[in-house]
Image: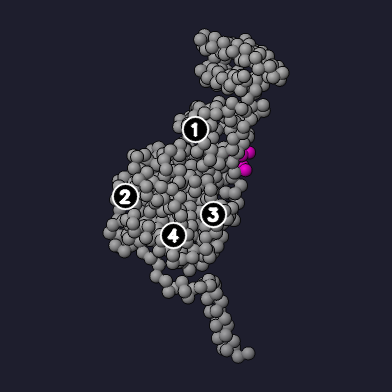
């Protein structure tokens, strides 16, 4: 073969191969004819944020023009504005069931209404993903679905306020789930369990230095493999990749408490929900285009981290629920009610409860939380419910149910033995627990309570409800006497009296 001909043919082949590599997509010709829509912000070249009606029109246009995009309303704000979930997948977004069973990532814009750049980032990025021919991004969209809640707080955006229309800072409500907006976000987190979630914010009164701050979930109850991969993502991957574009970076919240382990904020909740999380914070006094660009670079960095480390990320994320359920069952592991990975905890439960006993009223009050955190409860007990710590989302349970937690929703009774919950035998082991914690002044008082409970156990086994009730009343008298004479700690007395009331309800005729 003539060398030059051969070389020419080879180069032609290389070009063809290159074309196949660069443009592996079918329907490329049609796609390139389409002019991707612009946001209102882009059309005005950064002079004025995208308005609410423009956002609605933009989402509809993108979804109409690109097969890769679908969107739905997942909630409604206090003032009745829609909160949307946008899905971007290739060649089209899978069904919600397949998204939930497969892999996905979530970008949340503008929980704080006066922080507008994150929302513009979300809108531009979802459009860019809808039309991109970038090989890495298309490959990523093949493997995973990218979800967006572009405007998490539409009323706040409209009014340009941090809070929602009820004056509530929704980014303090991810544990309480007390607002419509937060419930919409929680329903997405609970349904899809994203591998990575970006929670994008701004520092409204900050003029720069650095241009963009970032942080990972720092709460100490987060799965350790997850937290350390999360830290690596921010420090070793995102900082350099964003800086490459000329933006200065830094950790959010140093010094001060803003960067701590607070279980009520989205950043930490993402880790407590067993996913990777990223907080981004641009400087709100800088030029709008600059802020949106910085946000875009950060999330593009996340996308390429996700692409490059896909196997490792998905393996660590998918293993976290099982690891957490196991740790939840290990009583020798502490639970941290405060502190952070950069902050010595001061409120630690050294012996982790096996679970929490709730009255039926308390369980009813927790229905939304049980649902939106996918917590499992056991009906071991007619007078109440038992929430075991041995489950994937164990890391939110003490925050919600333990009376020692700062922002608990109800005061459940912490149990340290999961056998025979709702019986005198189980309550007897709770007395032992409090005795070990030095909750009693006199050993004699411990023995008296245990003898009474042993008697009740015998009558329970004979199903002699009259005698059970009579001896439960006797138990209350004993506890009241100990309280009156300061022979028992307040905590122990509260839980043991509460437990006795539940047993009385159970044995009520
Ligand atoms: Zn914010």
Q: Is residue 256 visible?
A: yes
- Going from N to C along the chain, the mark reached first, 3 or 2, is 3
Whether residue 323 is in magenta: the answer is: yes
Q: Residue at x 44, y 67 (%)?
A: 65
Q: Nearer the viewer, residue 206 or 328?
A: 328
What span is colored magenta in the figure?
Answer: 322-326
- Going from N to C along the chain, the mark reached first, 1 or 3, is 3
Q: Nearer the viewer, residue 380 or 344?
A: 380
- Image mark count: 4
Residue projecting furthest to the left: 47
How many angstroms separate mark 1 from mark 2 (CA)?
32 Å
Task: For mark 1, give the secondary structure.
Answer: helix
Q: Are marks 2 and 4 in contact (CB under 8 Å)?
A: no
User: Dot 3 corresponds to which residue?
Assistant: 96
Residue 31 left/right relative to 501:
left
Task: For mark 2, give the secondary structure.
Answer: helix
């Amino acid at each position: 073969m003539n060398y030059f001909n051969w070389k020419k043919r080879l180069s032609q082949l290389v070009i063809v191969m290159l074309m196949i590599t660069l443009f592996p997509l079918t329907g490329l010709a049609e796609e390139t004819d389409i002019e991707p829509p612009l946001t209102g912000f882009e059309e005005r070249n950064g002079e004025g944020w995208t308005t609410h009606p423009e956002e609605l029109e933009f989402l509809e246009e993108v979804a109409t023009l690109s097969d890769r995009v679908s969107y739905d309303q997942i909630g409604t704000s206090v003032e009745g504005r829609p909160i949307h979930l946008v899905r971007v997948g290739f060649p089209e977004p899978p069904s919600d069931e397949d998204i939930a069973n497969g892999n996905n990532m979530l970008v949340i814009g503008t929980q704080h209404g006066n922080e507008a750049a994150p929302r513009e980032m979300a809108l531009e990025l979802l459009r860019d993903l809808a039309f991109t021919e970038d090989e890495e991004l298309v490959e990523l969209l093949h493997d995973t679905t990218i979800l967006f809640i572009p405007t998490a707080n539409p009323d706040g955006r409209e009014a340009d306020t941090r809070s929602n229309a009820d004056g509530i800072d929704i980014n303090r409500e991810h544990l309480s789930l007390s607002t419509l907006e937060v419930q919409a976000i929680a329903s997405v987190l609970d349904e899809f369990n994203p591998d990575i979630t970006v929670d994008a914010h701004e520092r409204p009164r900050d003029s720069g230095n650095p241009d963009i701050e970032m942080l990972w979930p720092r709460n100490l109850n987060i799965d350790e493999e997850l937290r350390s991969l999360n830290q690596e993502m921010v420090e070793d991957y995102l900082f350099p990749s964003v800086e490459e574009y000329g933006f200065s970076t830094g950790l959010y919240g140093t010094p001060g408490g803003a960067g701590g382990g607070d279980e009520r904020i989205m950043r930490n909740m993402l880790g407590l929900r067993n996913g990777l999380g990223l907080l981004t914070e641009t400087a709100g006094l800088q030029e709008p285009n600059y802020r949106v660009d910085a946000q875009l670079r950060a999330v593009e960095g996340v996308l390429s981290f996700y692409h490059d480390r896909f196997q490792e990320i998905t393996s660590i994320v998918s293993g976290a629920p099982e690891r957490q359920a196991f740790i939840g069952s290990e009583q020798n592991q502490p639970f941290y009610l405060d502190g952070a990975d950069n902050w010595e905890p001061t409120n630690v439960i050294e012996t982790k409860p096996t679970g929490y006993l709730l009255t039926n009223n308390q369980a009813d009050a927790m229905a939304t939380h049980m649902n939106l955190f996918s917590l499992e409860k056991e009906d071991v007990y007619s007078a109440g419910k038992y929430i075991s710590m041995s489950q994937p989302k164990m890391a939110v349970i003490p925050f919600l149910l333990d009376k020692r937690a700062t922002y608990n929703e109800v005061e459940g009774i912490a149990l340290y033995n999961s056998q025979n919950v709702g019986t005198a035998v189980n309550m007897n082991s709770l007395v032992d627990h409090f005795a070990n914690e030095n909750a009693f002044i006199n050993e004699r008082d411990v023995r008296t309570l245990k003898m009474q409970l042993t008697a009740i156990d015998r009558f329970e086994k004979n199903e002699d409800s009259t005698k059970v009730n009579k001896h439960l009343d006797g138990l209350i008298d004993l506890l009241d006497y100990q309280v009156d004479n300061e022979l028992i700690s307040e905590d122990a007395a509260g839980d043991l009296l509460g437990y006795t009331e539940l047993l009385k309800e159970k044995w009520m005729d």
